[in-house]
Amino acid sequence: MRENKDTNNKKKKSLTLAQKKKLCEKQRDQKLSGVQLAAQYGISTSTVFDILKRSEHWLSIDTTLPNANNFRKKSSVYPQLEEVMSIWIDQQISRNLTINGPIIQQKAVECANLLDITNFSASAGWLSNFKQRNNLHTYKKKGEASSAPTGQKPIYRVADMYQICTQYV
């Protein structure tokens, strides 16, 4: 739990996404009252009831992901683009192709154009946030995968990307 000081010198406690899910599970399984849950978590009863109003949402969270320890879910300005990019990255990883930041940024610009998204720039900040939201990390390939020719760029199928993008238009 994170504690912040309020103007009234009260300590404000924020629950992580995983803690909110656990709270909803306790209420569902153990039939604990809002007052009991508030005492257990050190939060107000109104906060407990606000969390329980959205219990279906909190119960659907996957606590095995690293972002389950975040205090709030960060959303994207371009959800359609991010969905297309996630699909594309999954395809590239399943093909064991090497992808890096500049390749992701270039493909994001191409997809944004196909989706008629204006004012989009695949900046370093966008890339960093995209990687964080999608739990993407940098890995060093070892063994036979690392001996692949690096001078060749992966071939991207424009028709495949167009087909994926048209699902969102």
Image: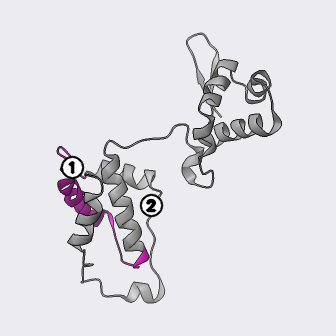
Amino acid type of the residue tagged 1 in the rendering = Ser
Q: Secondary structure at mark 1?
A: loop
Q: Nearer the viewer, residue 154 or 144?
A: 154
Labelled disc at residue 136: 2
Question: Does the stretch in magenta take in 32?
Answer: no
2 lies left or right of 151: right
Residue 93 is situated, as x and y percent measured from the top left of the image, at 41, 73
Residue depicted at x 57% and y 16%? 6
Q: Magenta segment, which residues?
A: 94-122
Q: Give the total number of marks visible in the rendering.
A: 2
The N terminus sits in image quarter? top right
Q: Residues within 10 Å of mark 1 (few under 14, many from 20)?
A: some
Residue depicted at x 47% and y 87%? 143
Residue depicted at x 65% and y 37%? 20
Q: Secondary structure at mark 2?
A: loop
Amino acid type of the residue tagged 2 in the rendering = Leu
Q: Earlier in the sequence, mark 1 or mark 2?
A: 1
8 lies left or right of 167: right
Q: Is residue 127 visible?
A: no
Labelled disc at residue 121: 1
The answer to which image quadrant residue 104 occupies is bottom left
Q: Is residue 148 visible?
A: yes
Q: Residues within 10 Å of mark 2 (few under 14, many from 20)?
A: few
Question: Does the stretch in magenta take in 114?
Answer: yes
Residue 65 is situated, as x and y percent measured from the top left of the image, at 57, 54
The answer to which image quadrant residue 74 occupies is top left
165 lies left or right of 141: left
Residue 46 is situated, as x and y percent measured from the top left of the image, at 65, 18
Tell me the distance, in whole angstroms, between the alpha carbons under discs 1 and 2: 20 Å
Labelled disc at residue 41: none
Residue pushed farthest top? 8
Q: Nearer the viewer, residue 159 or 107?
A: 159
